[in-house]
Each structure stands twice: as C-alpha cells, then as structure tokens.
Image (cartoon, helix red, strand yellow):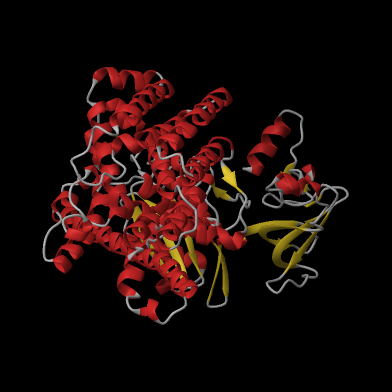
Amino acid sequence: MQRRFAAAMAARGGTFHAMYGQTEATARIACLPAGMAVERAGCIGFAVPGGALSLRDEAGAEVAGAGEGELYYAGPNVMMGYATVRSDLARGAEVAALATGDIARREADGLYRIVGRKRRMSKIAGVRIGHDAVEAGLAARGIAAAVFGGDDGLRVAFEGPGDAAEVAGIAAEIAGVMRRSVDAFAVAALPRLPSGKVDYQTLSRMARPDAEEGVAAAYRACFHPVPVAAGDSFASLGGDSLRHVELALVLERALGHVPEGWERMPVAALARLEAGGKGGADQGVATDLAVRAGAILAVVVTHETLWPVYGGAAAMVVLVGLMWARFQREAVVAGDLWHLLRPLARVLLPYYLILLGYSLAWGQVPLGSALLVSNFGIGDPVDHDRLPFLYWFVEAYAQMLLLLAGLAMVPAVRRVVRENPFRAGLYALGGAMALRVWGADLLGLGGRRLFTVPWVLYLACFGWLVGCADTRRRKWIVLGLAAGVMPLVAWLGGNWYGAWLKYGGIFGVLALLLFVPRLRCPAWLRGPVVTVAASSYLIYLTHRLVPEVGLAGWEAWLPGWAFSALAILGGLGFGVVLALGQRRVGAWWAKRGADRAQVVAGAV
C-alpha cells in the first residue's frame, strides 16, 4: 500500500511521507522519509522532531541496538494523562513516556518497524507470533481470516466453505509452530464492530461457546425464554424493576460500575465494555438503586425495631411506577398484554412458595392471600386464613399491574400515553388522588384493610411522572404537586408524627429521583448497595423468617439489641443468598434451554 501511494505521488511530481501515531501523542509519533518510501516500505521511520523512540522488553528493561520490544515514545506532544471526571483536569502531567502497546523492531540503521500489537501476540514454544502477521499471511493466500488466542495456542476464524484442518495447517506453517497449536473454524462472515474492525470478543465466544459467561449470558438468563440478540437492550426487551436491579448487579460486578443509560445500550456494547475489563470513572450509584437499597433496609429495620424509619415500602411503590414509565410505556401504547403482565411471574413465583410454606405449617390455605385480595380485609393471620400483613405489597403490586393492563386496553388511554406520557401521568395522578380521598373507605370487605390500591396508587403515579419528567419545568411541576399531596396524605393517614415522617421522606425521595440522577458512593460501599438493591424483593418476602423461625427461642437469653441486630443482618443476608441462588438457577435453566434448542436445530 505504501509503495502504491509513493508511486502515485511520484507520477504527479509529489512526495509521500508515511506517518505513524496515536491519539495520546497528538496523533504523530514517527515519519518515514519520502526518499525511503519504496525500498523501506512497511517501516514507520524515525521519531518526529523533538521526540524519541525506545524499545522495552517484557521485564520493562530498555532494549539496546537492533532488537525487538514494546515501542515507547517520549516528547512534548505526549498527553498529560487520562481524564475521566472533571476533577482530573486539575491534575498535573502524569505520563513521561507513552507505552504504545505496539511491538516494534529496530533495524540496524535505526529505522523502526511495527510487527504486531502487544495484546495481539502469542508466545508458543518460545516463538513470538503476531496475530496480525498470520492474518496477513492467510490473506496473501486468499483466505479472509481473523486470528486470536494466547500462549496456549492460536484460533483462526475464516470466511467461506474451506476445510478447517487445511486452514489450520496453513496458519501453523505461517506462524512457524506445530499444527497441534492451531485450531480453525469457519464462519459465514467475520463479525465486526460498528467501526468496521473485527469483533474478536465475539469470535472468542464463538470458539468457546460452553465457556460463555458475563453480561450477555446474564441477559439471556434474566429474560429466558425470550431470545436475546446482540442488538437488543434492556428497554427493547421490556425489562421490569426486578430484572433492572438484577442486571445492574451483574454490570457492577463485571465493569466495576453501572454505566449511565445502560438500559438502552445494546447487549453487544455492554459485552464490549466487559471485555475491556473493570475501570472507568467512579460514577457513584444510580439514585433509584440507592433508594431501593435504602427502602428495603428501612422496611427490615421498621419490622424489627421501633425506630421511626417509615416509608420504605411506599418508596418501593414509587419505584414501581418509575420502572413502568421507563420500560413498560411502549407496551402500554401497543396494548401488549404479554409484556405488561410478564413481570407477574417473577413476582408471584417466590410469593406462592412462601404461601405454600405457611399453608403446610398452618394446615390450611390462606385463601384471601392465594387470591391476592386479602389486603381488602379478608381474613386474619391469627386465624391462619391470611398471610402476615407485611405481604400486602405483593397484592397491591399485582392489583395495580392488572389495572394498568386494563387501562392499556382502552384506545383513548393508549393515545394519550403515546402523544404525551407526562400528561397521561397527571391524569392518572388526579384519578388516584380522587380514589385516595373518597375511595379508600369504600373498598373494604369487613376485616382489617391494609394498603389497598386506593391507598398506594398515587405513589406509583408519582413514580410514572418522575420517569416522564424530561424537562426542568416538568421536574418542578412534579415536585410542586408532591409538596401539596404529601401533607394531605399525611393528614389523611392519621395526622401523627409517623405519617409526617413517612411522607416527608417520600417527598425527599422524589426530589432525589428528579434532580440527582446519581449519588456519590465510596467504591467499597457501591457493591453492597447494588447487591442489597438487587435482592430487595426476596429480602422483603423472607426477612421475618429469620427472627420468627431461625432465631425462635433466642430472644429469651440474648440482649434485645443483639437479637435485633441478628434479625436485621440475618434478614438482609438470607435474602441476598436466596437472590444469588435464584440467579444461578435462572442461568442454569436458560443454558439448559439453549442446549435443547441447539439439539433441536442440529436435528433439523
């Protein structure tokens, strides 16, 4: 290519200077003099004026004279360092010599020639092999291929109907290694990134399908049996609140942070971030995740102690509405009942397992709880015809989701949501407040009512409005409405200090969700926060089993503070362990389904 351009310029009376550089060195590092463009084609030449090139071996020692090693460049055009947050811009220069990541050879006359990338090299039986060089050798023989691998061997993916054994033999000959060190497989077309470069990460997974793990596998396990393609995103798959926190935990562990806006990023893009390893800016933790973790902690503490940390479950209802606005809105517009109701399965399966346990222990089935209507006043836990009162949240969630699905069947509702979802949320809030003021006392069946739909629907509507408040004006409208509604419901809720603490806290939660998308969080705390958030639902369902079953009898000989501490920590830990088990079972089930699909496809 260099010779072609040099000849073209010479035919026009011009000269051709081949240049080499990297962005970190302001784009220019070396230049090949025009007089050498033909006979020394392939070399990068000498360092630009004011700069200096050097080579270092694998131990970091400088290579003297003619030799080979990683190319380093020093000069005034080298960057100061990498900035990932605003405060980094105040730091001084931190890079004296730029490690280019390229493996180069310095020839006898001092010219440098790039022979491969450090990350694209293998050392097999003492032979250093550049993957790019093997690719070029295969291309010269008419084989379009991509080469990757490590010191254990080379992998060659090639396009077309060629024989894999023959291609592997040719690659081994080019690399100068034994045939057993090379594997080859055919692909219809080499996968490429949006930039046009070969997607080696995807090829690596194709070469080792049984070892596939990480973000892509987590998506498939989370949405099984719905198929997940590389271009799908959490939003396009119709994700819900439980899947949201579950995948956020996966991203936190895989990337070291949860990228902002990850919900609309394709799975392939997240997998590429994962391939790059942990790192990046410390972006804190998303406010909705922090609120979820804080909310479940408040629930557990309130149920065990008399501490006035009220409002945890109410905050979780707000988050339900927020998730609907973010990820279920399109399903509402389309009237897609499958996507709207699909989250019920993940919510009700563990709930009914809990109900089964109580039924076996009590010797009878709590019918109102089984039908998800006991919060309207059916039965009493003392008589074993209703689950403990704390499970009202599951019933209210199911009822609100069924109400949302019913509204989505009305063409006028779908039209308003499609044209202006924020206005639709205002209408819904008006209706929900009418229910709260006038309908709460009407919907009862004689027993103890506990947080029926009229009591909590307006909270979900506020969550929807937060999710649709896409301008600063709309954010202030939502906060202004909350400033009027929260005192009203505190007064309606008994006008006692607990109600004012609870709804004052909900006002603060709404303010955070509206105006603070991410909260600063120490790196050591971010993982536990996301883990608790991802396990919040199972913590909610099971935390009281720890003091009432697991620690039964201990309260007689443990100090009160110690028993409460064990109950709180045990309740959190038990839920986290159950959530981990649930994710592993889900991953196993998804992989089993994928294996069955492969068997069927092979038979066909």
Q: Position of residue 495 (x, y in %)?
A: 45, 39
Check the image and name the residue furthest to the right. Answer: 50
Which image quarter is the N terminus in?
top right
Instruction: Please say whether residue 134 is visible from this viewpoint.
Output: no
Q: Is residue 155 left or right of residue 108?
A: left
Res 102 visible: yes
Q: Is residue 434 left or right of residue 449?
A: right
**As rendered, which of 439 and 399 lies closer to the eye?**
439
Q: Is residue 344 left or right of residue 533?
A: left
- The quadrant holding residue 317 is top left
At x 63%, y 59%, the residue is 115
Q: Is residue 529 above or below residue 183?
A: above
Quadrant assignment, res 6:
top right
Residue at the (74%, 57%) spot, across then down: 112
- Rendering coords of residue 291 (x, y %): 49, 48
In the depicted view, which residue is nearer to us: 32 or 287? 287
Q: How many marks?
A: 0
- Residue 458 position, x and y percent, is 38, 33
The answer to which image quadrant residue 126 occupies is bottom right
Q: Residue most toward the left?
A: 364
Residue in front for this viewpoint, 503 or 54 = 503
Indicate whether 512 appears above or below 345.
Answer: above
User: Relative to 59, does residue 372 appear above or below in the rendering?
Assistant: above
Residue 45 at x, y percent in the picture: 76, 51
Residue farthest along the bottom direction in this orientation: 557
Is 194 situated left or right of 390 in this image?
right
